[in-house]
Image: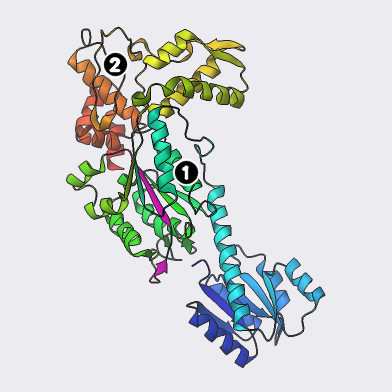
Amino acid sequence: MPIEKIIVLEDDLILRKNLEQQLRQRRYDVATASNIAAAQELLSKDNFDLMFVDVRLPDGEGTDLLRQLQTRAQKPLVVIMTGFGTIESAVNCMRDGAFDYIIKPFSSDIIDFTLRKAEDFTRLLRVNQYLSHDEGDESGYELLGRSPAMEKLRALIRKVARTQATVLIQGESGTGKELVARAIYRESPRSSSAFIKVNCAAIPENLIESEFFGHEKGAFTGALNKREGRFELAHGGTILLDEVSEVSTQVQAKLLRVLQERELERVGGSRTIKVDARVIATTNRNLEQSVERKEFRQDLYFRLNVVPILVPPLRERAEDVAFLAEQFMHRLSRKHGVRVSGISPACMATLRAHHWPGNVRELQNVIERAVILASEDEDLQPQHLGFSPASISHSTGAESQFTPLNGASPSAVNAGETSLADVERQHILHVLDLCKGNRTHAAKRLEISIRTLRNKLHEYGVGRGEELAEEEVA
């Protein structure tokens, strides 16, 4: 509910009490004032979402208060009420910042219409404020690929999109899980409403509950104003819980309630808020294994896994490599202003032979690097890709490949020339790279303790021991 707290500023006792009663029946928090001084005192103590303001008051004009409110950082919407309405006064009030202008006496239907309009406006404003800070790195790219696996995935998306079912998208890092979620949203009946994304892995654990459910003013240190959570912003639309496996068990219990009851309470609040948002969740972990290890609630897993979608890794649809490489080359050459003539046969052969542990994201990054390093009007060459000789998988069959934990496969290593210690080192560093240097996540993925990982990295000469200790404490 975007509108919660309302002030009724009216000197007529009967009209003030009548409007207050109507608003309370609609479950709003209402404060009343008979003059401007009393209203200013209310505004100094709390933030309000909406005000009904009479024009003629004992200690001044309501329009004077309207102009004063425009200088406030947190200003409520103002509905001007008057029994002597003219076109000129209405125009002046709207110019000074009034949200609406109604003539007394007014009916209950007029109040309903005004409140509904204010609710819609406030929700749209807050969603736009959120979206203006949303990076949306992948939102400009559609789901690319011509392989049978991708055609099957697109067909499943079309079938699932037209329903209201909760969807769990699983796949390795870099396969395009967010793109699948956005495709479901674009083809759904909710495509005209908000699409709100929550990156569960990027939000600190002590803040994620506030991000999900919002908070009231004074709920904790730094909560200077009321704030709606992501679920409230997604009301009527779709919410994406990206990397939902990273949510703590405490927040998982509250998330389960939202999925079951479609209601929540803000941090520090007691008001129950109804929400209607379609939930799409993504994860690069095997949640069934996380459930067995007691890291993820089984009941929440069942709630999320109504419609499971598995995004295949790039190595299982190798026929898409050439097509994706061409698409990325054209887009990134335009982005960086580099005129590249094409991809050489030797470069394409190298791309086809690579195992792509980082999937489509790795391919995109490799092509971007190649475009930047290439000269004008030159074909991309193998040396532009930035692969080390050990990372290029040859098709001679002389090398064997291994599959590490969680399905992430590093580049092939030469079984005849590489020791077991080197294989272990390469695998650990590869998983650490997949986790973007986060040693806590890497240790979980490798199924070893953070201390063991620290000792291994110290042995490899990666980082200093005190830095690792600090990160473990943090």
Numbered label attached to residue 412: 2
Residue 80 placement (x, y as % from top left): 68, 76
Residue 242 placement (x, y as % from top left): 39, 45
Residue 294 placement (x, y as % from top left): 19, 48
Q: How is the image coloured?
A: rainbow
Q: Amino acid at mark 2?
A: Ala
Q: Nearer the viewer, residue 113 or 66?
A: 113
Residue 333 placement (x, y as % from top left): 58, 22
Neighbour tally class for label 2: few under 14, some 14-19, many 20 plus, Cα within 10 Å: some
277 over 51 or under it: above or below: above
* Mark in the foreground, 1 or 2: 1
409 over 53 or under it: above or below: above
Q: Quadrant of the C terminus?
A: top left
Neighbour tally class for label 1: few under 14, some 14-19, many 20 plus, Cα within 10 Å: many
Numbered label attached to residue 182: 1
353 over 263 or under it: above or below: above
Q: Are marks 1 and 2 in contact (CB under 8 Å)?
A: no
Residue 282 shown in magenta: yes
Residue at (57%, 88%) from the top-left corner?
Answer: 18
The stretch of residues the image draws in magenta is: 269-284
Q: Relative to 414, is 325 on the left or the right?
A: right
